[in-house]
Image: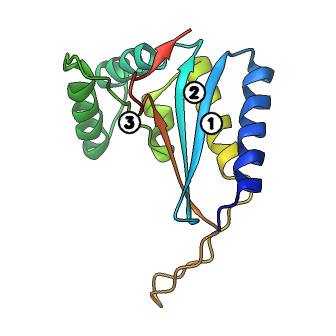
Amino acid sequence: MVTDTLKSKVLGLIKQSATDLGVNLRVTARIKDYSALKVNIQSCSIDLKQNMLDTIKDKLVNGRLLGTDREYLQIVLSNLEQETDEPQSLPCSEYKLDKLFSGQALELMEKLFASIRCDYYCNSDSARDYFDVAYYYELTIGKNKSGFKVV
């Protein structure tokens, strides 16, 4: 169950992680249906979008990727390169961070996910169709009216 206490704790850990890395970061969080914590990066001193573009292009050219990883990165790259006037949110998969980001951006994203999962547990058993998780979470980049900004 997601409470205001958990939300405050996560935001505090995120702020501390950003301070430790020397990164200027603006993050918001909201609770959805008391079961999900939705965290959004509104602005950052690291250009996460450019880092993602550079990392994906490098992985596609120089990386040894399996077929599904290559397809996933090609789709993400295609979506990122589409020019629109609308603010665009960036995809952020916890399980593909090393393929989407590099350097200080990767370190920041890993610390953000660690902060979000501070009180997380998963005792689910798919063989018995039994789900027991502490809470659901989602990290987005620039999912707001103005999109992501570099500060």
Left or right placement of residue 146 versus residue 94 in this view:
left
Which numbered circle lies on residue 58? none
Query: Is 125 situated left or right of 14 in this image?
Result: left
Q: Indicate the secondary structure of the residue bearing disc 3.
A: loop
For the point 33% across and 36% down, which residue is it?
65
Q: Quadrant of residue 129?
A: bottom left
Q: Residue under label 1, please give it.
A: 110
Toward the bottom, the furthest residue is 128
Q: Nearer the viewer, residue 148 or 51?
A: 148
Identify the residue position indicated by label 3 in the image.
91
For residue 86, which quarter of the picture?
A: top left
Q: Secondary structure at mark 2?
A: helix
Quadrant of image for the C terminus: top right
Residue 108 horizontal side relative to residue 13, left or right: left
For marks 1 and 3, give the CA distance: 15 Å
Can you tell which of label 2 and label 3 is closer to the viewer? 3
Which label number is shown at residue 106?
Answer: 2
81 vs 140, left or right, is left
Nearer-N-terminus badge (2/3): 3
Q: Position of residue 127 (x, y in %)?
A: 46, 87
Which residue sits at x=44%, y=28%?
142
For the point 78% across and 47% down, the residue is 9
Q: CA distance from mark 1 to mark 2?
A: 6 Å
The three-letter code of the residue at mark 3 reads Pro
Instruction: Please say if the residues under marks 1 and 3 sit with CB atoms less than 8 Å apart.
Output: no
Q: Amino acid at mark 2?
A: Leu
- Dot 1 or dot 3: first in sequence order is 3
- Check contact, mark 1 vs mark 2: CB within 8 A: yes
Q: Amino acid at mark 1?
A: Glu
Nearer the observer, 122 or 61: 122
Q: Residue 83 occupies which quadrant of the picture?
A: top left
Residue at image position (41%, 13%) is: 50
